[in-house]
Image (cartoon, rainbow, N blue to C red):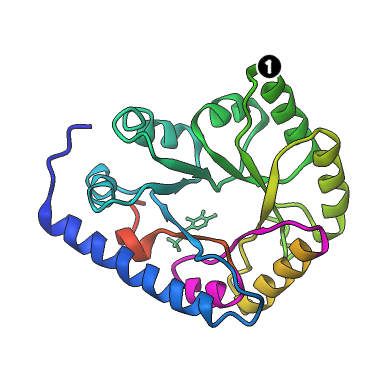
């Protein structure tokens, strides 16, 4: 990509990354559970201007999250050749007709929430001989408008993934705005433990410290790193 390097912007984003990483690291060592490795910080670059993404790369960050396949292609397809150690996570809802494109671009798909999606992923994985790591998104607040499998339907989804030999690494949730996120993080941890899954993707700009304290392995932060998104 051809963005000129903006030293001030790079410094600002570098400082944000450093501060958040330090908070996450110290909170996760205070975690009330058995010790976990330092959580991965996923910089959520959706609807961020190209120069801010470039600044994060210049600051040395390599792990990014996007919530739309097409926008992610615009942000990352060109950069993938320049930055071979990128790790890209899909954190937004996935339509069945975008599965192929998503599997070609992303290293991790965190928003798997239904049998049809698992079937499609398995089909393409068989064809291409390659499958991203998968997280199952759980609708812990049982909100109508939110994607994610309902907690009651999670066991069947996990069984289905296992029957297809798919690499399910963990669970992901987005708590309802109005609830105490800690309750949802604790619930997600309970579910992950019950099914023997190690990955826990939880926490955003407003609650990443709590998520780290509750045992998150992956934390998805956008605005606290990059500033407000384009609307
Ligand atoms: C946008 C988004 C985030 C980041 O949100 P911020 O509040 O900007 O940190 C995290 N997770 C998901 C699923 C998102 O869509």
Q: Residue at x 59, y 68 (%)?
A: 36
Q: Residue at x 60, y 24 (%)?
A: 100
Q: Is residue 180 magenta?
A: no
Q: Residue at x 28, y 47 (%)?
A: 57
Q: Name the spot of residue 54 as percent of width and height, x first.
A: 24, 44
Occupied quadrant, residue 86:
top left
Placement of 18 over or under 6, stated as above or below? below
Depth order, front residue of 130/187 = 130
Quarter occupied by the N terminus: top left
Q: Residue at x 79, y 56 (%)?
A: 150
Does label 1 point to a residue whose CB lies under 8 Å from ligand 1? Answer: no
Name the side, left or right, on which 46 lies relative to 123: left
Occupied quadrant, residue 160:
top right
Instruction: Identify the residue under disc 1.
Output: 127
Name the side, left or right, on which 160 lies relative to 180: right
Q: Name the spot of residue 112 as percent of width and height, x first.
A: 68, 44
Placement of 49 over or under 38, stated as above or below? above
Placement of 213 over or under 104, stated as above or below? below
Q: Is residue 46 visible?
A: no
Q: Name the spot of residue 156 as percent of width and height, x first.
A: 88, 48
Name the side, left or right, on which 48 lies relative to 101: left
Placement of 69 over or under 42, stated as above or below? above
Q: Name the spot of residue 68 as percent of width and height, x first.
A: 50, 40
- Look at the numbered disc 1 and give the secondary structure of its residue: helix
Q: Which residues are magenta?
A: 194-215
Q: Is residue 210 magenta?
A: yes
């Amino acid at each position: 990509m051809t963005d000129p390097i903006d030293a001030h912007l790079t410094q600002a984003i570098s400082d944000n990354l450093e501060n958040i990483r330090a908070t996450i690291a110290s909170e996760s060592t205070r975690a009330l559970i058995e010790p976990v490795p330092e959580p991965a910080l996923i910089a959520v670059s959706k609807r961020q201007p190209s120069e801010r993404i470039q600044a994060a790369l210049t600051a040395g960050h390599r792990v990014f999250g996007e919530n739309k396949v097409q926008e992610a292609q615009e942000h990352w397809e060109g950069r993938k050749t320049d930055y071979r150690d990128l790790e890209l996570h899909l954190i937004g809802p996935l339509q069945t007709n975008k599965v192929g494109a998503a599997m070609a671009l992303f290293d991790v798909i965190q928003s798997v929430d239904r049998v049809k999606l698992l079937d499609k992923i398995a089909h393409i994985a068989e064809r291409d001989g390659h499958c991203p790591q998968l997280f199952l998104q759980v609708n812990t607040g049982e909100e109508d408008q939110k994607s994610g499998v309902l907690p009651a339907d999670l066991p069947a989804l996990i069984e289905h993934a296992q029957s297809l030999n798919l690499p399910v690494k963990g669970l992901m949730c987005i708590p309802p705005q109005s609830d105490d996120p800690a309750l949802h993080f604790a619930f997600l941890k309970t579910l992950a433990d019950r099914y023997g899954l190690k990955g826990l993707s939880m926490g955003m700009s407003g609650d990443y410290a709590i998520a780290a304290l509750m045992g998150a392995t992956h934390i998805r932060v956008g605005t606290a790193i990059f500033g407000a998104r384009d609307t």
